[in-house]
Image (cartoon, rainbow, N blue to C red):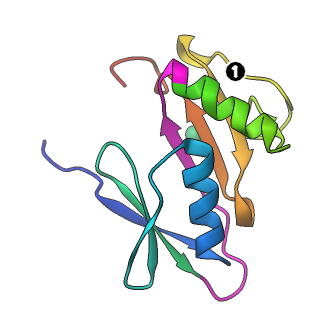
Amino acid sequence: MAVELNHTIVLARDKEQTARHLTRLLDLPPHTTFGPFAVVQLANGVSLDIADDHGRPHPQHYAFLVTEDEFDAIHARIVAAGLTYWADPFHRRAGVVNHADGGRGLYWLAPDDHSLEILTVPYGGWPG
Ligand SMILES: [Fe+2]
């Protein structure tokens, strides 16, 4: 099977703000511009193409697989930014990192209440 996700569109009230949130916290290269999109490029070739919506977009969920070292760095940036994070997608365990599938994970909110997640092991464990 050779089908890969290449890009998806993320709706935002302010695409620049959302792009900066992602690139700053995840330590990604600065976003680029393509047509109406602020493009955030991820390591596996997938891009998040952020577009301004008219009105408040419906919050979505985006999960990022990171290394243990990246997790530590992202976690530290979330804390330094004063953002709340949770161990669970229902936001019941604030300030807690989960250890699902033998790895680590946490959730936080991006602008427009998009739910972001970092995890070091895919759901169900390797190979994912
Ligand atoms: Fe998730």
Residue sticking out furthest to the front: 30
Quarter containing the N terminus: top left
Dividing the picture into quarters, in which one does residue 44 lie? top left
Report the residue marked by disc 1: 98
Assign the C terminus to one quadrant of the image.
Answer: top left
Q: Residue at the location (46% across, 63% down)?
A: 31
In-front residue for pair 13/92: 13
Figure check: 46 above or below 27: below
Residue that lies at the very extreme toward the left in this rendered image: 2
> Callout 1, which amino acid?
Asn
Dividing the picture into quarters, in which one does residue 22 lie? bottom right
Secondary structure under badge 1?
Answer: loop
Identify the residue shown where x is 35% and y is 43%: 43
76 in magenta: no
Residue in view at x 44 percent, y 52 percent: 29
What crowding class fits label 1: few (fewer than 14 Cα within 10 Å), some (14-19), or many (20 or more)?
A: some
Residue situated in front as seen by the camera: 78 or 60: 78
Q: Quadrant of residue 94?
A: top right
Determine whether, in the image, residue 85 is placed left or right of residue 11: right
Say which residue appears at 70% left-offset and 21% top-offset: 98
Q: Is residue 61 magenta?
A: yes
Percent position of residue 90, x then y = 78, 41
Residue at mark 1: C-beta within 8 A of ligand 1: no
The range drawn in magenta is: 53-69
Q: Position of residue 75 (x, y in %)?
A: 69, 31
